[in-house]
Amino acid sequence: MADDLLNGVLGTEDDKSDSPAPESAAGAEAFAAAVAARLSANDPGVARKTESFLEKQTELLGLQAQHLRDEHSARLVHLRLTVAAAKRKRYADHMRNALYTCIALLVVGVLLAAVRMTFEAMTDHSLVVEDFTVPSDFTPRGITSQALAEDLASRVAAIRATGTRNSIATSGEVRADQAGILKVQIPETGISVDELGRFLHQWLGHQTFVNGELREEAGGAISLVLHIAGADPIVVSGTTTGLDRLMQTAAEKAFAFFDPPNEIIYLDATGRRAEAYDAAVAYVHSARLAALPSVERAAAYGLLGREDPDRRRALSSVSIATDIDPREAAEWAVAADCSGDLGHDEAALDFSRKELGTNRRDQPISRRDAYPRLMAQAHVEIEAATGDFMAVLRDYNGAYDGDTNDVLIARYLVRAQLAALLHDEAAARQELAGALAAGAATSRVLVVRVRWSISSAAGDWVQALEAAKALVAEEEAQKSAALESNPQRPEFADPAEL
């Protein structure tokens, strides 16, 4: 019976051969539970032990389930902490990257600022007015060293502004010495940004320094003395009440040394044509010009031709300029103007075409900004010479731009003359009236020429003859004024010497 019972539990040999080996996940425990279940059916003791075993297994399973729940909660907490830590790390990485970026930008900014300071220093051709030496008894009257320096700098700057506004060439900046301005200290260096900039400008730049002194002379007179490196002292004398005039004269003389071409333009723009021509002649024959590059010598002769009221002699001067450097556009423009004034229309057209054949890169640096305007003017001159007056009307404003009153008057007069050439007498007279209302002098050469054009276009030959006579008289008066300004100059008497 025991064998039967054992065989019933374990099975016979045949049963063993027919049943597969247990491969369930329960393993030995499942096998033991199965044996216990079979035995407990016939033995109460085994049943109690089986029940106790199953209770312990149930308790163990409960503990395992609780452990899994606790482990799951712990894993969730750990996961949340891990995510939070990752977010903090990412934020820290962003902050670190931003800090590194700011540092890199700061370094790049400092380098760019250093490059800019160096470039500005290397290209600095400014005039710097330093403090004056002033007698102590002038101080109670407000005449101090700094006040005189700032006054002179402002006057020279005003002269420069007038000259460059009417010139195709730019001029260096003018400023008073700023040694006493607020300084920004560079950490751990003991120097300021201003001091570093001043050092670079003095070391690498091409500054012209001016300093002066105010002297008391006998009899209540005063003298203003300017000292400029490379030039003889500039001395102007007068009375204390005439200090304003002395300062203006000194400023003009200082600017004449600093930028002779634009000083000549300044004199011309302020109506001092005879002085402008004298200054141009003196500049052409100065020893200083002989040491300058060919482009500067050519520009000087071209400027002389522009200022010379004798257009034949002016053309001779400009011919010298184009021989020295035929690449400069401005000198061909002056040659075209001179030829046009002399009635040599074919030559003027040829000179304008040669002007168009120049290149911007061959021009002096100070004139390159004005090169597009010169080209536009050359196109207008060619259009006018070939009779394309509608094209001139279309292109004129772009070629002769500017906001000065002289430019406004010139536009009125050109439009008036073009309207006359197009036989629009009403429009021509309206434009002439606009020029006169803007302040054009009735004796001005351009005004008289417009009157002649209007009368000729209208067939009023009596008025045209009167206008032609007035035009000849005005041009002769300009020549006489130039001769009277300095009749001893050999250049006036013998154009061939130019």
Image: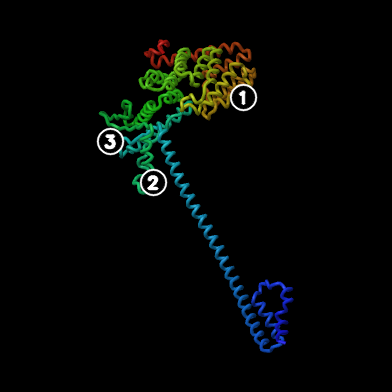
Residue type highlighted by circle 2: Val
Name the residue tied to disc 2.
Answer: 184
Residue type highlighted by circle 1: Arg
- Who's the residue at 45% across and 41% down the image? 112
Task: Work out whether mark 1 precedes mark 3 in sequence or the reverse, and give the earlier one.
Answer: 3
Residue found at the far left of this picture: 218
Q: Are marks 1 and 3 in contact (CB under 8 Å)?
A: no
Q: Nearer the viewer, residue 327 or 438?
A: 327
Task: Work out whether mark 2 precedes mark 3 in sequence or the reverse, and give the earlier one.
Answer: 3
Of the numbered discs in the image, which one, if any, rests on residue 394? 1
Of the numbered discs in the image, which one, if any, rests on residue 9? none
Which quarter shows the N terminus?
Answer: bottom right
Of the numbered discs in the image, which one, if any, rests on residue 135? 3
Q: Are marks 2 and 3 in contact (CB under 8 Å)?
A: no
Residue 260: x percent and y percent? 40, 24
Residue 292 appearing in the image: yes
Residue 341: x percent and y percent? 52, 14
Q: Are marks 2 and 1 in contact (CB under 8 Å)?
A: no
| C-alpha distance separating marks 1 and 3 | 61 Å
Mark 2 or 1: the one toward you: 2
Q: Secondary structure at mark 3?
A: loop
Task: Work out whether mark 2 precedes mark 1 in sequence or the reverse, and give the earlier one.
Answer: 2
Which colour assignment does the render follow? rainbow
